[in-house]
Structure formats: C-alpha cells, structure tokens
Amino acid sequence: MLSIKNLHASIDGKEILRGIDLEVKAGEVHAIMGPNASGKTTLAQLLAGRALYAVTAGSVQYLGRDLLSMTPEQRACEGVFLAFQYPVEIPGISNALFLKTALNAIRKYHLLPELDAMDFLSLVRERMKRVGMDDAMLLRAVNEGFSGGEKKRNEILQLSVLQPKLAILDETDSGLDIDALKLIADGINDMRDHERAIILVTHYQRLLDYVVPDMVHVLSQGRIVKSGGADLAKNLEQHGYSWVNTDAIANQAIQNSQITQANQAP
Amino acid sequence: MHAQPQSWQNIALSLVPYELAGNSTPWVLATRKAAFKRFESHGFPTRREEEWKYTDVSLISKRGTLAPDNIPPEASSEAKLLAWTLPSEGMHLMVFVNGHFDSGLSNIDDLPAGVQISSLADMLDEGAELPKDLFKQQHEHTVFSALNNAFVTDGAVLNITPNTVVNKPIYILLIASGHGTAIYPRMIIMAGAGARATIIEHYMGTLDAHNFTNATTQINLGDGATIEHCKLTQEGPAAAHIAGIHVQQAEGSHFTSKSFVFGGRLVRNDITVSLNEPNCTCTLDGLYLLNDKQHVDHHTRIDHIAASCTSREYYRGVLDGESRGVFNGKVIVHHGANNTDANQTNHNLLLSRQAEIDTKPQLEIFADDVKCTHGATVGQLSDESLFYLRSRGLDEVVARSMLIYGFANDIIRGVNVPYLRTRLEHLLLDRLPQGEMVKELL
Amino acid sequence: MTTTKQLDELINREYQHGFYTQLEADTIPLGLNESTVRLISAKKNEPAFMLEWRLKAYQHWLTLSEPTWPNLHYPPIDYQHAYYYSAPKSEKTGPRDLSEIDPELLRTYEKLGIPLREQQVLAGVAVDAVFDSVSVATTFKQKLSTLGIIFCPFSEAVQKHPELVQQYLGSVVPYTDNFFASLNAAVFSDGSFCYIPPGVRCPMELSTYFRINAKNTGQFERTLIIADKDSYVSYLEGCTAPMRDENQLHAAVVELIALEGARIKYATVQNWYPGDKDGKGGIYNFVTKRGDCRGDRSHISWTQVETGSAITWKYPSVILRGNGSVGEFYSVALTNHHQQADTGTKMIHIGQDTKSTVLSKGISAGYGQNTYRGLIKVLSGAENARNYTQCDSLLLGSKCGAHTFPYIEVKNPSAKVEHEASTSRIGEDQLFYCTQRGIPPEDAVSMIVSGFCKAVFQELPMEFAVEAQKLLGVSLEGGTG
C-alpha cells in the first residue's frame, strides 16, 4: 500500500529525514518509535502533505501512485488520514459542521451522494458512543477549549467517521490516562482489517500493549535504525533508545536485511 | 498657517549662530540653523494635530523665553545635595546642572576599557567627528526635536566599543533649578556589536524650578547589543518636560526602555524604536503616577521594519487629583516584516472624579505573517480585592494603598538596578496615603 | 509561500450583482447648487420647513471640506459631476400594489435575491425597497398600521406626518455634523421612515433594500427611526449596486431615536459594488449612522456586515444619554482587491450605569486595507459606565493591511473600559488540518473565516445571517467556488 524509498526531507535547509525506507502492506499495523526529535512527526506530517517540509530525495508510492505530487486534500480523499499530535482549534466552527464538510468532500470525490444532516448525525452519534464522547461535543467549536484527552478522542472519532485506508496516528497516546488510552486503543483496533493499514507513531511502548503491531521500526536521527516484531518495542522499553543508538551503524546492515525479510513474510 | 503665540519669536536667531557650543564648527552651526528653520516653519504644535490631540503645549509657548542659558550656572547647594544623595560606588555618574555638564559633581573616572563618555559640548567645541552623524540627524518625530537640535547646550556622548560589557550602570542625573530656564540636553549613545550597558537618565527638578526641559536621546544598537535605558522624570511641580528617545536597532539586538514619571506639570515622552534588522527584541515599559494638575503624555512608536522581531510594551498609570494621562502606543508592522510578534498593553487606574485618561493603543499592519495583540483598560481598584484585604483586618485606606502599590510595582519590580528600584519604590510609597504602613506590611 | 499564493488565487472573483436595469428615469440636471436643492424639495412637494432646513444644510456644507483623517486613499470627488436626483419614471403614477410595479424592476430584485412576493409570503418581512432614491414598494403597511406603526418612504412621512419629521429630523445627526451629513441633508431624495408607538413590539422584521442603479447618481437616502417608550423594532438594511466603472457616491444618514425603555436593533448587510480586481470603479460609501438612547433603559444595537464598496467610511454610533441605556456594535468588514474600509463606532457614555459592547472583526485580503476606528468616551457624569471592546483582524495574503485606531477617553473614576485587539493571519496549521480531512482549500478558508465572524453573525436575524455568510464566501472565493 505504502512504499517509501530513500526519503530525504528538510525544513529551512536543515535535514530531518535522511533516507527512510519503509514498506507497509494493507492489513498491517506498523509502529514507528523513536526518541524526541528523531523525525517521527516530520515523517507523519510529510506523508499527509504538510508544505513545511521540502523533500530533497526519494519517493513515496501510495496504492501505486506518487503520493508526493498530491495535495493534502487529494491525499485525504484517497484515504490518507493523519491523527495530529496537536489537533488544531478552529474557533466558531462546530465539530459537526467540520466533520460533515470533510466527510461529504471525500464522498463527493468518490462520486458518492452527499450525506444529509440526518444520516450524518445518526452515523456520527453511533461512532461517538464508541469512543466515549458526549453528544454535546458535536456543537462545540472544533477542538476549542477541549482538554488534551478530548482532542485525542476527537481525532479518533474523525478517523472512525472518515474510514481512511491508511491511518497515521501521531503520538495519539501521549498525555492520556489509562482509561482513555484503552478507549483509544479500542477505537484503533476497531479499524483494523485486512484492507486497511495503520501507522502508529509513538514515543512510548504502552499503546502497543493494547494495539499489537505487526512491525516495529525505530527512528533515530532521520533514519530507521532498527526494525523488528512486536518484541522490539518491549526491548526498547527495558533498555531505552540509547540501546539502538550505540550500535546504530552496525545495525544498519542487519536492519536492511530484516526489512527485506519482513516484507517477504506473508 | 499655524497660529503662533508671540513669545517664542523673542528668540533672536542671532543667538543660534554665535553663542552655543560648537558653533565655530561649520557643520554644527549649519545643523542648528536648519533645525531652527524647521521649528520656525511649523511652530508649536496645536491640538488640531493628531499627535497632539490631547496635549496642549501653550504652557510652554507662553513662557518668557525659549533661549537656553549659555553659561554653565554655579551648581546650587540644593543641586549639590541632590547629586550627593546618589551612592558614589557602583555607578558611573554624570551630573548636568541646567543642561550643562558639571565635572565636579560627576564621577566617570573608572570606566572600563572600551567605553568612552564625554560631554557633548566639549566634543562639539573640539569639532570632534564622533557624534556628527547622530547629531546631524534631523528627527522628523516632533518639532521639539528640531528645537532641541537648534539649541542643544550639552549632553552625554557614550560610545561603547564592540563586545564591551559595562557592568555598572551609567547614571546621568540632570538637575534643573531656577526660574524660566530652558534646558536642552542631548544624549547620544552608540553601542557596538555585542556591547551591553544599562543607562539611567534621571531628571530632577527643585520644588521652585520653572524650567522647560527639551531633551533628546538617541540610541544606536549594533548587532547583538543589549541596552537597558531607564528614565525617571521627577521634575518640579511647575516644570514642563518634553523629550524624545529615538532608538535604532541592528540585527539580534535587545533594547529595553523603562519610563517612570512622577513629577512635572506637563510631561511628554516620545519614544520611537526602529527594528531595522531581523531577530531584535524591544521592550517598552512605563509607569506614570499622577496627581494635582499634572499632565503626562507618552507617545510610543515601534516600527517593525525587519522580519522576526519581537516587541513588548507594558504601560501602567495611576491618576489622582485633576491629573490627565495620555497614552498613545503605535505599533507599525511594515510590508515584509513577517514573523513579527508584537504585544502592547496599557492599564490605568482612575482614582479621582477630576482625573482623566485618554488612551489609544494603535496597530497598523502591512504584513500578513504576524501575531499582534494589544489591549487597554481603564478602571478602578477591584472591590473584591479591597474586600479581601479588609476582611483580613486592614483599614480601607491602607488596603487601597496596598492595591495601588501592587498595581504600580508591577512595572517597578522589573528594574534591574537595585538602587533605582529602591528609589522608585520609595517614591511610590511616598505618594500613597498611609504609605509607611504599607511599607511595613510588605 | 504556498498558503499565501493559494489565498491570492482564491480571492479573485467577479461581483455577482453586476447588472444594469434598463429603466426610464426622471433625472435633474448635473451638478449641485442652491437651485438643485430647491428643485429636489419642489419635486417632493415638501413643506417650507424642509426646504429651509435643506438650504441651511447646503449653506453649511459650502463652508466644510472633506475629512482627510481617515485611513483612505482615493482621487478627489467632483461633487459637481453627479446627478443629485434620479427617480424611476414609472413611479410617477405610484404603484398601488406589486402588480403595478415595473416587472423589470421586480426582476432586478429577484436577481438580488429578494423577490418581494416570496419575502412577503415566506419570511413575513415588510420591505420598503428604495430604488435609486425613491421608495417604490411598501408592503405589509396595512398590518403595521393597525398597530399604529408608521413605516413608509421618507417623502411620504414628510407629507403625512410632518410633525414627527420636524420634531426628530436632524436631532441625532444635525445638518452641521460632518461634510457628508451636511451634503445628505441638503440633497437627500428619499429613504425610510419608521415610528413605533409606545409599548408596541413590532411583530416583524422591517427591511429596506437600497440599490444604486442609474449612472452617476449619488445616492443620498435618509432613514429616521423612532422607537417610542417601551417599544421594540428590528430593522434590516441591505445594499447592492450594479457594476460600473465610475465611482459612485453614496452618502446616507441614519438616525435612530430610542425613548425610555425602547429597543432598536439595526442590521446592515452592505454589498455595494466594490470595484474590479484592479481597483477600478466601485462605490464610495460615506455614511453617518447614529443612534440616540434618549430615554432611560433604552437599547440600541448596530450590526453590520460590510463586504462591498470601494471605500467605506462609516461609524455607527450610540449616544448613551439615558440612565441604564445600552449600546452595541457588532461588525464584520471584509476588504478584498483594492477595497478600503475605515469603519468602527463611537460610544458616548453620558448617563449613569450605561453599558456598551463593541465587537469588530476585520478581514483583509488582496490589496485590501481595513481600519477599525473607535471612540469610547466616558463623560464625567457617567457613573458606573462599562465598555468592553474586542477587535480582531484576520489577514489573508501578504499585500493587505489591518489597522486599529481605538480612542479611549475616560473622565469618570467609576468607569470600567476594556479594549482588546488581535491581528493574525489564517493559520497554516488550521488550513492543513482542514485539507488533511479532505476539505478543499477554498472551502477551508471560507470555513475558518466564517468561524472567525461567528460571534457577529449570531447577532443577525436568521435569514440575514445566512445571506451574510454566503456573501462572505463569494467575496473570498475564486472562479472555481
């Protein structure tokens, strides 16, 4: 579904991504882990089309098409969804209007009839129940005055309403208490199926206790320095990121072969 | 044409050419003449002009003379006392009496290497090139800066070479005494790249002084320089004081201005800052504490010319008696000054029925990538706070004084020079009913 | 900057109300002098007090010069090169009902989106439509008159209720008030008049549509609304003008008088022709609007959505004379292309316990220049006066400007005045968030802008709020939208 090759990207002339290679297939859940400033958020936002970053080398294929040449809204309509690390506030625009506009824009793109207010409301109410959101949140302005947990939940609500093909969740677990974390994890697990791919970008392992990934990649200084199965995350939890950093170069070769192996796995 | 009062015309233009400092130097004389012409062609501003809408300067034009004293006066015993109250240690001191440098009262001997402080009059008389560029600048800001340029008697020229750090504050005390005196000081401050210094201008008038002080201060900051400028206006109750502080900032420099006005019948400060190159910061703070028939006007203007500069402005006023406060803060973000961050606030406490405040925080923005906010409030002490203090056993007068103290001290506590901060706190407490009591409680 | 570029593309669009109705017009000779004033008065068959008042205004106008203080730039206006009176010919006979109105005229209204019939039936709005200065249709008059409400063209009020006109005309905006108000007093041709008797709550929204049609006609309408004790009225004013190359002058005066306990809500959606994208053409809109809270506990609120005109000069104000009176000003002003707006309000606190609220949202795009100019004045007798002002500007594009000139003058120590202002551009992060969810950029901009204005739209009656939102959208969008 997603094929990233030798991706280099910079912001204001400073190189952040220094050759990322990543293959994600439909049905897979990948976790991208790494210390702060390793390039995780850059990668997530770049895939969604944020114009802040300049791609200096490499390519990204999404469903066989060149992802980098698409505008953010095209990517969204083609099924790329980013759950933001810091969801943005839009004063004066209700959550309901925002989500309805987004959903209908995507439906229109696929030549589907737009949902009317009633159909939309019944859909969104049902989804809200699942992520444990109160009806009143629909009438509040998008993310305005939401607590950290409410914002994250709102991202998951959007995810479940828009039903993307590729969901990228940027630190969706940060700042949540355990109950909220479980709810969010349930929301993500709900979305798992053989047609959809999910990329979890996270600093900590704890989300991965609830959403077990097929693959874990460690990002450091703009490169994937280690890849492995769900166990890798556990190792990281025990040994910290310095464990992968010290033998990063030595691991480079191993890592490359692992990726190949992983991709060859059924 | 502007209607002109007669009195200022008594300045014989002939006085300009012959008797003031440096007039034997051709460029000095030419500058003075040109400046006087400019003043003469416009005359005193009237309230019909937007910049003078709330401030009537006819008080000045009605005075006897605008011509400065030519000869340095003998420092009065009172003036000497004032100078001696300053701590002799811990600062570089320059004293001016009625606009003339008094080397006897000053102490600028142990300057660090890389710092040069001189009397402007001496330099002009010598025809020194150093202050030429800044002296010649014809400030378009007000007609009063033209008047200053025409009649300037003396002042300080401070030159700090690159990367020099002046640890002790440079304290410039300007004493006014006597009747009908016109005083024209001029400060020229040049800070080289990476230089750091704190400069205090303290205008002090004796109780009986009827002076008109017209001061101009120019400050140029080189790349990465850091200058803090504090001004304390403590003129006598009958004095008129009109001043301009004009600042130019180069890349990455930091400028702070703090203006405190306690004294003077009519005070006007025009403070302008040009953020000419990227990554500068500038902070303008001010406090005016007024009583009786005092009229105090602050006009500030910050020009964001280059991108990525930050400006902060924070003014507070407490108005009692029949006083009138005017605040006009202009922030102009020029085309291309993207990534500007500007914030401005002006808070006022009105304590009397006869007092008046006119405030105008003004934004003019020609760039789109900016974050600018401003705010102004006029109000009185909060009943809730007052009640809280009274419920803790303070009587109402003390409680009120305490709240006013807190309101005003918000600005004072940002002063980095301990001597000045203490002095300001005292001045504040002296103004408050039961100030002594408040002091004990603090 | 992709964002800036996108925005610049988005904000190019053509004026949608640009059409010109072929109508036979009754026009007087070009230019302005004393005989023009006499001629207008004679054509209206006015009583002597009106002519006298107009002539005094004209004489006073001659002594004035155009104000130069606004933050506006335009070539000098030649006041002698304008027609000061233009009435559709068909008006002469006077339509008794809608079927008598020139069908061409009705189609014009339909293009503007105000089909009279539909509005009558569906919205229950009484429309007094002003077409090039003369009222041509007044509806719902019957129903209103049973309540004692007078709602008619100004010229009719002069004939039928001269005592009310004489008592209140110029009592809020005297003919000496300012250059444009003097000019209006001298030459105004028509407008709306409204009187609500004591204790009456007007059962429907009263509405006037103004539209400039004939070439080179300055429009000088005058509106006078009197809400007697404990009455209530909500009044809507909408303005559009066809597309023209020459700038047309519009100098209206609106006077509102609220007596004890009365409440007037006055809403405007102004969409005069703004000129093309190069700044050619467009209306010069110099308007004096002022309300007088004359009685205790009276309440006047102004709501305006200003998206049109090449130049807008307008400060709907409230004189808070009565004790406990309330003044409000809610404004959205949008300037695109080369439009300039210098607008704001004055709240003059005279009475005790008076309260005012100012909420201003300025949006600048293209080369637009948007200025908020406000005065909050608390006189020494205004015990416990309160004002809260919030004034936000949004910048779309790198060549526009947003300016704020708030004057605050306080002479009473019990007053509380608060002013807050902010200026920012549309957040790149907001745009990205919306587009990432699949919303096209132009819709995203429109959405963010209408969110920015929401607090003002809430003050508009429902049908106006919808129209205002649409207007804002088309004023920003490109040809694709």
Image (cartoon, rainbow, N blue to C red):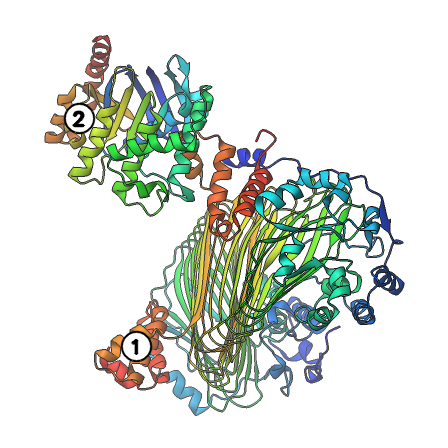
Q: Position of residue A5 (x, y in %)?
A: 34, 16
The kind of residue tagged 1 is Leu
Q: Which residue is mark 2?
A: A244
Which one is in front, A56 or B117?
A: A56
Report how many numbered discs are placed on residues in the image.
2
Q: Chain of mark 2?
A: A
Residue A197: x %, y % from top left: 28, 19
Q: Quadrant of the C terminus of chain C?
A: top right
User: Is there any visible trace of residue A42 in the rendered image?
Assistant: no
Q: Determine which residue is flagged by label 1.
A: B386
User: Is A260 above or below relative to A169?
Assistant: above
Q: Position of residue B202 (x, y in %)?
A: 43, 76
Give the label, 2 or 1, closer to the camera.
1
Q: Residue at x 38, y 15 (%)?
A: A61
Q: State whether residue B172 is above or below residue B334.
A: below
Mark 2 → mark 1, Cα distance in angstroms: 61 Å
**Picture coordinates of residue C400, whole percent (x, y):** 58, 45
Given the current orientation, which residue lies at the most extreme left position? A238
Closer to us: B150 or C332: C332
Question: Which structural element holds mark 1?
Answer: helix
Q: Chain of mark 1?
A: B
Labels 2 and 1 positioned on one and the same chain:
no
**Residue at the image position 48 percent from the left and 70 percent from the top:** B118
Question: Quick check: can you spot residue C341?
Answer: yes
Considering only vertical position in the picture, is A36 above or below B425?
A: above
Q: Image check: C66 left or right of B194?
A: right
- Which residue is pictured at 78% across the width and 42% down the height? C102
User: For this view, does B340 lie left or right of residue C303?
Assistant: left
Q: Which amino acid lies under the numbered mark 2 shown in the image of this protein?
A: Val
Q: Secondary structure at mark 2?
A: helix
